[in-house]
Image (cartoon, rainbow, N blue to C red):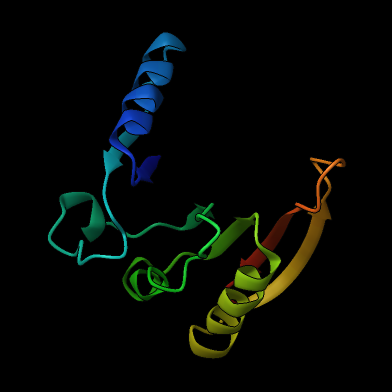
Amino acid sequence: MTGIEGDLPLVRHARSNAELNQIKNVEFYAADLTKDVSEQPWSKKRFNKVLLDPSRAGAAEILHNFKHWKPERIVYVSCNPSTLARDAGILVNELGYQLVKAGVMDMFPQTAHVESIALFVKP
């Protein structure tokens, strides 16, 4: 398993958690996926499954990477339904994925914020 995160302290925390839990089949890297990462060794791999949890701005700037990685399944977790909708349009109309399931969780009932989860598959 490969984890990519834009914040180096979070990468260090993930590595520490993996070590603490004796999980040895994981690698974590810090990278800004909005930039060209094609020369990074981990970026040359193909990933059959992707868990995507972008910031409120969404993932539009990084979806171009999926053309190379060619994941079969994408689970997209979003705290912003409007950017999820925009990115779903890119995944379906430009990259050929199908939206299979979607749901909303009200994890913070005292606020207007919701978490959305969508599953995309390559037919």
The percent coordinates of residue 4 (x first, y second) are 35, 46
Q: Residue furthest front?
A: 111
Q: Residue furthest right?
A: 109
Q: Nearer the viewer, residue 68 or 64?
A: 64
Q: Nearer the viewer, residue 32 or 21?
A: 32
Residue 71 in sight: yes
Q: Is residue 64 left or right of residue 56?
A: left
The percent coordinates of residue 18 (x first, y second) are 41, 20
Q: Is residue 89 left or right of residue 95?
A: right
Q: Residue at x 57, y 62 (%)?
A: 73
Q: Is residue 79 left or right of residue 113?
A: left
Residue 8 lies in what quarter of the image? Answer: top left
Q: Residue furthest left?
A: 39
Q: Residue at x 71, y 56 (%)?
A: 117
Q: How many numbered markers are drawn?
A: 0
Q: Residue at x 50, y 88 (%)?
A: 94
The percent coordinates of residue 118 (x first, y second) are 69, 62
Residue 26 in sight: no
Image quadrant holding the C terminus, namely bottom right
Image quadrant holding the N terminus, namely top left
Residue 47 lies in what quarter of the image? Answer: bottom left
- Residue 112 lies, with reference to residue 122, above or below; the image says above
Residue 69 lies in what quarter of the image? Answer: bottom left
Q: Residue at x 31, y 65 (%)?
A: 34
- Residue 111 lies, with reference to residue 38, above or below; the image says above
- Residue 103 lies, with reference to residue 92, above or below; the image says above
